[in-house]
Amino acid sequence: MEHPLTQAFPSCLFPDNLTLIPGLREVYELHLAWLEAETLTGAALVEQAAYFCAVDGRPTRHFLTCVGETLKLPDFSSARLKSFFKTNSFRTGYATHGLFPYRGKFHPQMVRGILNVIGVGPGKTVLDPMMGSGTVLIEAALLGADAVGVDISPFCAFMTETKASGLTMSLERSEGALANVETTFDYFARRYGVALPVPARQSAAADDLRQVMEEGADYVVSGRRFRERGTAETYALLLLAFLDTMGYTQRSQRKPPLEQFRGILERYLHCCRKFQRVHNAQGFDLGQVDARQGDARRLDLAEASVDAVLFSPPYSFAIDYAENDAFHLTALGVDRANLDDSMIGLRGGSRLADKYACYLDDMGQVLRECHRVLRNGCHCVIVVGTNSNQLSKVLKQPADQVTGLHKVLRDVAESVGFSFSAEIPRAIKGIANTMREEYIVFLKKK
């Protein structure tokens, strides 16, 4: 019998006809890859797989979406950032996931793997009741499934809708905005408080661009609909790039805001163009995206109306999303006070114990709603980190004796009718000083 040392490692886990995506190095990735191989047929693996680049020598759709020039970053970006996206080109940054670096966002490849494992594909509907930057919705659409996302933050609804539009929208006028980048930036800077001199020379193209801006502002800020959808999509993409610029400017002074905006808008257009080329060449159907502002504790959805639920709840109160998005929310005309009073993880006043009690009560309501809208026999998946140091302060227990948040939420889920199926741990790298590990918790409605 051949000794295992003489075999390539992947062949011990997967059939010879499956070729893994380059760079897989974490246990949770191999676990999800194995589950994909066990769940999907050959044809579905080619069209949907997250962790395989080829099936019987045929490139997978995910491989074709990601391969080639990686996420375009401005020349002044740090070597560390460039290295991250180059190394993780199959994990994140592909399609329109590279639009806006939202804090605590999902890895898209992981989301795709989870959706495959729980049977999401064409003809199915998936719900993310706390959609954040919309990763679940975009991945579901790429798989041909319909998706409904809910978030209490209007900025999250706007961001997700813009990412979804970027998959198919005409880019002609956005390209024109990049060609007139000084005029574009000046418009947003004046409207949202960063005053710059008006460019001395105005072209006909610049005048047309200003008309697009004014009409688009009515759509995004006031919510009014108007005749030409392309105007709304163009304005939303440009506004998101500007808000991204303002966020980056608050974090770094390496380059003037105009240069930041130029680089970010170039990256946005690169992301959209690259995906649209693959989509046009492959000709596959995209699912519908329905991004809504709403409250996960009171979902405006019918009973037993979705085939899967996948979400990542706020990391308790580790991240203040309202404060983090303050500039963006103000730009959209949102009253921050209303969010502070209603956002899960922020309610409860200044005492940590009160915040934690409100958090658990809120999450009970969310899970009860998820159970209500999910069809029988279908899965609800929660991806949640646990901050033992923070919880030890709340519960006044040693950190090594604190019950992890993933176990607490699992108990809450079982109390509202879910049954526990499995959990997969994964290391957290981006905020390891706050949390070192999170868990993919699989639940099922009986």
Image (tube, grey):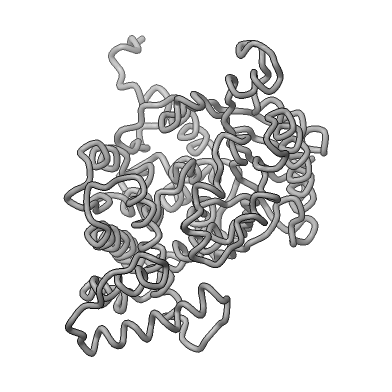
**What residue is at 74 percent from the left and 57 percent from the top?**
299
- Counting from the top left corner in percent of width and height, residue 253 is at 26, 47
Q: Quadrant of the N terminus?
A: top left
Residue under the image location 72 percent in, 28 percent down? 353
Left of 332 or right of it: where is 409? Answer: right
Is residue 124 among the parts visible in the rendering? Answer: no
Q: Is residue 110 above or below residue 162?
A: above
Residue 170 % position (x, y): 35, 76
Q: Residue at x 61, y 61 (%)?
A: 335
Residue 445 x %, y %: 76, 42
| Nearer to us in this view, 87 or 123 | 87
- Residue ID at (65%, 49%): 340
Q: Position of residue 178 (x, y in %)?
A: 24, 71
Residue 16 seen anywhere in this rendered image of the structure: yes
Left/right placement of residue 276 relative to residue 163 reads left
- Nearer-the-camera pick, 289 or 265: 265
* Total marks placed: 0
The quadrant the C terminus occupies is top right
Q: Quadrant of residue 65?
A: bottom left
**Front one among 123 and 77:** 77
Give the side of residue 149 with respect to residue 18, left or right: right
